């Protein structure tokens, strides 16, 4: 499936993939060469918008790729005038992301014994959905180190946001 057209050819520089949600969003950032991911996160919508602004200023973020589902229209409005947004067909991304999760993070312990169709990832995988959306737009996979830290939403309101600062300072390639 070619998600990209000549008029929509990839821009040089870092790109973000976004899987928007009402309470949490999956977010990934590519390196400027668009070969690998340098950041992955599960954030609130407010934190996601803040992170996109920081990546634009600090890492030269050029474009945000989101799925064409229900939440995409609101995000297109939010980002108008801030960053270019491209949409891709998001049909089937949840199931594909679950399968990709297990490719990126092979099951351990008792999960290895379960048939693949019955395995549920031990955490939310919205960041993997965001990665798949970006890969669909690029029409190729991005390398992701299994040790890439995942920035997560605080578990409770008011919980320490130390990890957020760590994500904001993603090292360059």
Image (tube, rainbow, N blue to C red):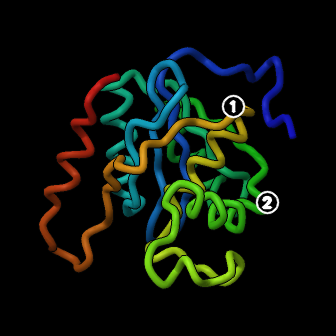
Toward the top, the furthest residue is 12
Q: Quadrant of residue 4?
A: top right
Describe residue 76's horizontal placement relative to residue 156 as left or right: right
Disc 1 to disc 2: CB gap under 8 Å: no
Residue at 26% across, 30% down: 171
Instruction: Indicate the position of residue 113 as horizontal and vertical percent values.
Output: 58, 83
Q: Secondary structure at mark 1?
A: helix
Q: Secondary structure at mark 2?
A: loop
Mark drawn on residue 91 = 2
Q: How many marks?
A: 2
Instruction: Indicate the position of residue 48 as horizontal and vertical percent values.
Output: 39, 52
Instruction: Indicate the position of residue 72 as horizontal and vertical percent values.
Output: 64, 54
Determine crowd level at label 2: few under 14, some 14-19, many 20+ residues with C-alpha closer than 10 A: few
Residue at 69% across, 31% down: 138
Q: Quadrant of residue 112?
A: bottom right
Mark drawn on residue 138 = 1
Residue at 42% across, 59% down: 45
Quarter of the rendering occupied by the C terminus: top left
Determine crowd level at label 1: few under 14, some 14-19, many 20+ residues with C-alpha closer than 10 A: many
Near-viewer residue (79 or 96): 96
- CA separation, marks 1 and 2? 16 Å
Instruction: Indicate the position of residue 157 as horizontal and vertical percent values.
Output: 22, 77
Quarter of the rendering occupied by the N terminus: top right
Mark drawn on residue 117 = none
- Looking at the image, residue 15 lies above or below residue 12: below
- Looking at the image, residue 65 lies above or below residue 20: above
Residue at 73% across, 52% down: 68
Q: Earlier in the sequence, mark 1 or mark 2?
A: 2
């Amino acid at each position: 499936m070619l998600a990209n057209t000549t008029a929509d050819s990839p821009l040089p520089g870092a790109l973000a993939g976004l899987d928007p949600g009402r309470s949490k969003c999956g977010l990934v950032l590519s390196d400027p060469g668009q070969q690998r991911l340098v950041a992955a996160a599960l954030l609130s919508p407010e934190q996601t918008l803040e992170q996109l602004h920081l990546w634009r200023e600090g890492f030269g973020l050029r474009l945000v790729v989101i799925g064409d589902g229900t939440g995409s229209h609101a995000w297109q409005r939010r980002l108008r005038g801030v960053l270019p947004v491209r949409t891709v067909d998001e049909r089937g991304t949840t199931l594909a992301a679950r399968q990709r999760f297990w490719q990126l993070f092979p099951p351990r312990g008792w999960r290895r014994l379960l048939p693949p169709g019955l395995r549920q990832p031990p955490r939310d995988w919205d960041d993997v959905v965001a990665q798949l959306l970006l890969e669909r737009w690029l029409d190729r996979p991005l390398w992701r180190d299994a040790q890439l830290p995942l920035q997560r939403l605080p578990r409770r309101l008011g919980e320490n946001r130390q990890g957020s600062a760590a994500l904001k300072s993603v090292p360059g390639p």
